[in-house]
Image: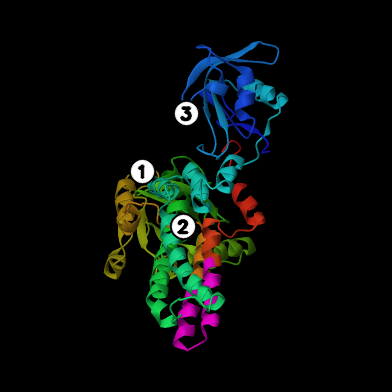
Amino acid sequence: MVDTIAAIATGGTVSAIGIIRMSGNEAIAIADKVFRAHGGTSLLDARDRQMYYGELVSLDGNLIDLVLCMISRGPNSYTGEDTAEFQCHGSPLVLSEVLKTLFSLGARQALQGEFTKRAFLNGRLDLVQAEAVIDLIESETLPAAHNAAGQLRGAVGIKLDAVYASLVDVISHFHAVIDYPDEDIGEFELQNYLSSLQGAKDELERLLSTHERGKIMLSGVPTAIIGRPNTGKSSLLNALLGYERAIVTDIPGTTRDTIEERVMFGGVLLRLIDTAGLRQTDDVVEKLGVERTRLALDDAKLAILVIDGSEPLREEDYDALRSIPENIPKVAVINKSDLPAEADIEDLDKSGLDFVRISAKSGEGLNDLDDKIKVLFPELEISATGEIITNSRQSEAIMRAVNCVTAAIDSMASAMTPDAVVVDIEAALSAIGEVTGKTMREDIISRIFERFCVGK
């Protein structure tokens, strides 16, 4: 007997529609006790995935709401179990009353992600698809949403299943020869499987290589806004966000710690980090801020160097430029274009550093900065079809699978015995199984679904 769970699947504020879901052995029977279809149809006789209009009543017969109701019988439902769904008017009070009535009839409150967890446990989704559900809900950009939708459709699972099957072929042939020596089974020759192992390794490495792009797509480009004190770094942050997030004064060194915010700019999700001004200082607190600025630069994938265009360039400006790692994109912002220009940017021009003139105060030039950033990340404009790994758990397991297949290939080259090679292949299968959920510990599964909201 699978207990029946129920939850509000929509938000907790007033809205046009509020949805309540149930899943479990008694879901349809419980729904039938509180729903009166206007056509007289009992939900026990209702057709799957067809909307019925009617009254939703309390146990004492009082009308709670006029609703739409739909049922789906397992295993052909989202969770693989019998499900029922009420589409009510979006009053939190009404939804709470409906939920209380369902609980009194034997349903219980669903836990976070329990509907999707049941879908996974009942074989309706693999683990990659299940994690794609919450990624789709939390997507902040269209590419991230497209990729999550592709994963939900099974793009990663299809690739991994093919690799898994090719490795299983090797294992099954080996064990067949060992376990059934009297049968007419072809001799197990490792070299016959070298191309299969190399193909598996290539496919796994291709998937793994997408993870860096996936992290940026999901979490944004870590962007350090740097420069000497009082060049307008915090003003630029506020201008990009469209509101005053950072304190702005004429006093150099106002920003003592890093401030982080996310914004869509240049067609890219930027994780903006406003940093303390880079300069030599005896102030203990400001020194800590400068050190945090350097740490932020170490993790950055984009640096925006802010220069005060109303003053001549100083050695501190050049120090800030030299502090940027050479292997990341960078752009200089010549700020305060609303004031007379004093900065000689010829050296910047000679260095090949892209720059734009802006006024963080008025917003002039921000469109030019938008265009500059857009061309720095062309790979993020490529349509995502679901084969980009955005999940660190999946990436780590795929990396272990790559290492195991590589070890198997190396063992073959070293003329190791077949059983030694098979041990590495079995370890690769286990790692791939962790990605899709074929081999997964219960504590890991619970941790995954804790990310979900209640009702999903």
- 444 part of magenta stretch: no
Distance CA(mark 3)–CA(mark 2): 37 Å
417 over 211 or under it: above or below:
below
Say which mark, if any, is on residue 49: 3
Rendering coords of residue 318 (x, y %): 40, 68
Distance CA(mark 1)–CA(mark 3): 52 Å
Rendering coords of residue 389 (x, y %): 45, 58
> In the depicted view, which residue is nearer to us: 293 or 320?
293
Q: Secondary structure at mark 2?
A: helix
Residue at figure coordinates x 28%, y 67% from the top left: 352
Say which mark, if any, is on residue 65: none
Q: Amino acid at mark 2?
A: Lys
In the rendered image, the quadrant that contains the C terminus is top right
> In the depicted view, which residue is nearer to us: 61 or 327?
61
130 over 396 or under it: above or below:
above
Q: Amino acid at mark 3?
A: Arg
264 over 197 or under it: above or below:
above
Disc 1 target residue: 363
- 410 part of magenta stretch: yes
Disc 2 target residue: 215
Q: Are marks 1 and 3 in contact (CB under 8 Å)?
A: no
Highlighted magenta segment, given as a residue range: 403-429
Occupied quadrant, residue 28: top right
